[in-house]
Amino acid sequence: MNKNDLIIRIGGEGGEGIISVGDMITQACARAGLDVYTFKTFPAEIKGGYAMYQVRASTEPVYNQGDIFDVLCVFNGEAYELNKARLKPGNAFVYDSPGDFEPVIPEGVFAYPIPMTKTAKELNNPRAKNMVAMGALSILFNIPEAALREVIDTKFKRRGDAVVQGNLTAFERGRELALALKKTDPWIIGTPKESKRDVIVMSGNNAIGLGALIAGLEFFAAYPITPATEIAIYVSKHLPKRGGTLIQAEDEIAAISQVLGASYAGKKSMTSTSGPGLSLMSEMLGMAFMSETPCVVADVQRGGPSTGLPTKHEQSDLFLAVHGAHGDSGRIVLSVENVHDCIGLTVTAFNLAEKYQCPVILLSDGSLAFSTQSVPYPNPDDYPTVDRLRWDGQGEYHRYELTESGISPMADPGTPNGMHIATGLEHNPAGMPSYTGENHEIMQGKRFRKLNTVVNDMPPAEVDGEGAADVGVIAWGSTIGVVREALQRLRAEGIKVKGFYPKLLNPLPVQQFEDFGATCKRIVLPEVNFQGQLAHFVRAETTLRPVSYTICSGMPFTPEMIVNRVKEMLA
Ligand code: COA
């Protein structure tokens, strides 16, 4: 039987090639025309520890990683131990046998022992254990064979023909082993509605890099940090070819400082980091606000505080993004929902930074960073770009001229008569240091005045549903995709629910929150952090009193969790 929405989870030890198998299955399903959404989690160590990859492949649009797997494939005892409680009747269970564990197969579970380790050893290619498993999965669940062969070739060809051939042989052996078993479960992946769709499959991190290039990125500096590093890697492959510059800085303070220098010189500039790096950047973000220097910081959130859970998912940098600064320092904070958003909102981040001449922090998260999803093939023409207001060279130049909007024209260095100082010291409209209280009040008013109109430059936050609702759900970041599906399920049961999905988190679009709140009897706000950070801002800035629903287990919410919470509220 075709399963139109199939979830396969693969678990094993870091170093066994779990991530590679997951990526390959994802690519093959996407090439076959299915909508894909993946979730992966791996240890902070390079080798050892539990690595897991979950692929959801569906004939319908998918917004999240799903509740739980239909198919579990484990490479070792640890992966079995960590997942065995979740095996339910109807699941298919593929496992290494003989292996380092003896599973107890629950009643109703369809079990397929595959000698993954043994076969790979027999082939004198122990690394190819993952290919044996993938071959078996492809037979059991009808994952397109030709597409898998293609991705094996693409993945390993840089390592030479022998590696490609060795992996293809192991893949073939895995298929033979599975063919010899009797398939007892009814599941195979769904048949796509259209066989060829104009989509690409990419990760959240790569999509942020792509969005930056579409926006006109000219300078990028960053210090590597999990889970943000792939943004820099992606940009490093493409920016130099377009005449731009990328620097791997010695640390995050250097990275943001270089970004501000390049932006002062007239270049569209960006850095990427994660929580610990954003903390280090906080002083220079104040400098960017004070000197009115456009810059974009992509912050891929991970479990914190401190070095925390570097490879795990969390949405806990919102306080830092909004208020991580000394003095009164403003910035714009956006947050992305999915891979598609990572492209478009990165362009928006640049446009806002350029228009308002201030820092823009783009919040992504650990789950989205590595999640691969199918997105419509991006057309740069669909993303209009904005450049900073430049001085027209007329009259006497005052860099920080007082204007109604608060926005003053910038002059690139070298512009005749456009000399000016960009300083972190308080300054007068001409840019000269000035410490009088009166001037400080005027200049703070000018800088913050700019932020008043940001809300008009963004589409209103999406309201999911119509009319009055018994429960409204406010969500941000990748939690939105989970809420979308939860609300569909609740509506199917006749429950009146609505969702509200803000992407602009600072300045908070207060009136939009109020309008949404006025249509809901009760509101719940799920987010993956301990303190309920967005709920805190909503309570502080609006009249809404959302019930905060927080988790911080390193994993995202599942739709089922949201469904259950809403039902609890109604009970
Ligand atoms: N034949 C040959 N090579 C293979 C293979 C096969 N059949 N299967 C996988 N490989 C290679 C992969 O290409 C990859 O090599 P590459 O990195 O040069 O591309 C390598 O083996 C690891 O395989 P992969 O599938 O990517 O990962 P994995 O599931 O084995 O898990 C990680 C390993 C990703 C968990 C681990 O290496 C890692 O990076 N951990 C995170 C470290 C981190 O970020 N820490 C935080 C610090 S703050």
Image: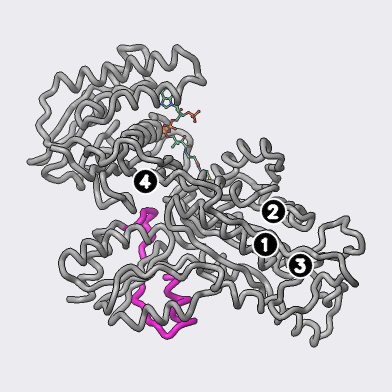
Q: Which mark is residue 133?
A: none
Image: 480 above or below 71: below
Mark 3 or mark 2, earlier in chain:
2
Q: Residue furthest left?
A: 107
Q: Which region of the structure is painted magenta?
A: 531-557
Front tag of 4 and 2: 2
Q: Of helix, strand and loop, which one carries label 1?
A: helix
Query: Is residue 8 left or right of 292 when viewed as pictured?
Result: left
For label 4, the crowd category at 10 Å Cα-Cα, with few meaning under 14, some 14 to 19 and many 20 or more, is many
Q: CA distance from mark 1 to mark 3?
A: 13 Å
x and y percentages locating residue 408 in the rendered image: 76, 71
Query: Is residue 511 left or right of 29 when viewed as pictured?
Result: right
Q: Are marks 3 and 2 in contact (CB under 8 Å)?
A: no
Query: Is residue 211 left or right of 327 when viewed as pictured?
Result: left
Please name the residue that numbered disc 4 is placed on.
Answer: 39
x and y percentages locating residue 48 in the rendered image: 41, 34
Q: State the residue in front, 323 or 59.
A: 59
For label 2, the crowd category at 10 Å Cα-Cα, with few meaning under 14, some 14 to 19 and many 20 or more, is many
Please name the residue that numbered disc 2 is placed on.
Answer: 268
Q: Of helix, strand and loop, which one carries label 2?
A: loop
x 38%, y 66%: residue: 475
Name the image quarter holding residue 131: top left
Q: CA distance from mark 3 to mark 2?
A: 16 Å
Please name the residue that numbered disc 1 is placed on.
Answer: 354
Q: State the residue in front, 411 or 322.
A: 411
Kind of residue sitting beneath label 2: Lys
x 26%, y 64%: residue: 487
Query: Is residue 109 left or right of 463 when viewed as pictured?
Result: left
Front tag of 3 and 2: 2
